[in-house]
Image: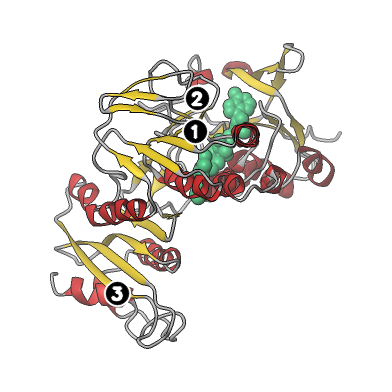
Amino acid sequence: MSEKPLRVVVIGGDAAGMSAASQVKRRIKTAEVTVLEKTEDVSYGACGMPYNIGFRGNINDLVVMRANDFKEKRGIDVRLLNEAVGIEEEKNKVVVKSLASSREYDIDYDYLVIATGAKASKPPIEGVQNRGVFTLKTLNDARIMKEYINERNPKRCVLIGGGFINLEMAENFRRLGIEEITILKRKEALMPEYEEEIDMMTKEELKKNGVNLVTGIELKKINESLSVETNKGVFDSDIVNIAIGVKPNTEFLSSTSVKTDKKGAIDVDRYFKTNVDNIYSGGDCALIYNRILKRNSYIPRGNNANKAGKIAGANIAGANEEFAGVVGTSAFKCFESTIGKTGLSLKEAQNEGYDAFKTVISAQTRAHGYPHQGKITVIFITQKKTGRLLGAQMIGDETVALRVDVMATALYSNMTIKDIQGLDLVYSPPFAPVWDPILVCANQAVKKV
Ligand SMILES: Cc1cc2nc3c(=O)[nH]c(=O)nc-3n(C[C@H](O)[C@H](O)[C@H](O)COP(=O)(O)OP(=O)(O)OC[C@H]3O[C@@H](n4cnc5c(N)ncnc54)[C@H](O)[C@@H]3O)c2cc1C
């Protein structure tokens, strides 16, 4: 008698979900893997959306693999426009609504993966649903925004929120020819997770590029004309983008015993298993193990979602892989500046009880005398007692991203500032000076330990 095939249902068809589905199928060819996706898109690079908009690219260029290809090449049953509306945990069933026919049906599983991502938060004010007011989270959000831009050819925009998405959008809206760009921000700091030196330099970059940044804003309403009313006046606009953070898509779990934190992010162990034995989760809907804090954090990022999905899928297929953890690495571009971070900021380190200090240096990114020079500011956060590196941040030319990666590797390996001082880094005039900016910062930091 042949054994029954393993039935795996994955809810959500992007980074975490498709990674999990592919991994199960790769390891167990006979597994019946079904992916439920409520939109018409799977497996796309949301991170590329600001540039796809700015460079007027084809939206389909962001799709890595289509639903049909997953079916034909990998044998995964991808069901588009099918939304999971509930889970009957005791019966191992997902309640699904077909958005095309409004029909509801059940699907049985041996293992379930929740990879539903997060939704963009909106401020609780009138007018956020007006035509011309956007949030950018799914591929369809980008599609609709592009159609609107083609139709209206906006000349003024208001960006609500000053995190990396709107900073990328400022650059890309300018690329589209939008001259008047205003960023409205509630707090003084653009990015509270960054040191004030980096925040100040980012503000200078915006100013240099003619972006009007207004902080201390309380929003009142968005009118149909798209003017935004605030405590500091009315800001006229032809297009509005809201990027003020995200919230995990986990409301449909409310009648289950799957544990979430206050924000609604699913709690998982280092195998990406939830508190329910046959339910796994990862990506923007879930927490992830933070290697520095030695506990879970909420870090909704594409690199994390892909890893989480891959390991969850492997473990469902019997791999027993323990996740090593993330250190919180990211970088983004804002006009001519690249800004990046890994690990903890000084405030985050102090809040965790570390006696920490910060070291700030500015340096050139290429050898003295080389014609094309770049600048970089490097900040290290170090534990005083042990000299252990706790975090690094940088702003400067495009070399920032790779130098942040070096620091992420150092953090991953629990290196001290003395270890970093001893690193054998490249010296080559077009790429790095004889004392790489990382070594310059380490030389300074080591004096304070
Ligand atoms: C503009 C922008 C730029 C970004 N840039 C970067 C970057 O440079 N680097 C980086 O690391 N990260 C970046 N990110 C974040 C990154 O895109 C996300 O972390 C990543 O997409 C998360 O993947 P995920 O699979 O967990 O969730 P998602 O990509 O959100 O996918 C979840 C899927 O689940 C579906 N779904 C939700 N609920 C249900 C349901 N009940 N039933 C069926 N389907 C459901 C959704 O429709 C969606 O397709 C960016 C994000 C945005 C929006």
Task: Answer with mark 1 or mark 3, whichever residue precedes in sequence.
Answer: 1
Left or right: residue 415 versus residue 352 is: right
Numbered label attached to residue 285:
1
Tell me where residue 201 sits by quadrant. bottom left
- Number of callouts in the render? 3
For badge 3, the amino acid type reads Ala
Q: Position of residue 273 (x, y in %)?
A: 51, 37
Residue 321 or 213: which is nearer the viewer? Answer: 213
* Residue type at tag 1: Cys
Q: Position of residue 105 (x, y in %)?
A: 72, 14
Residue at the spot of label 3: 363
Residue 378 coordinates in the image, percent (x, y): 29, 66
Give the crowd class for mark 2: few <14, some 14-19, many >=20 residues within 10 Å. Answer: many
In the displayed orientation, state which residue is furthest to the bottom: 369
Read off the residue under disc 2. Answer: 250
For label 2, the SS is loop
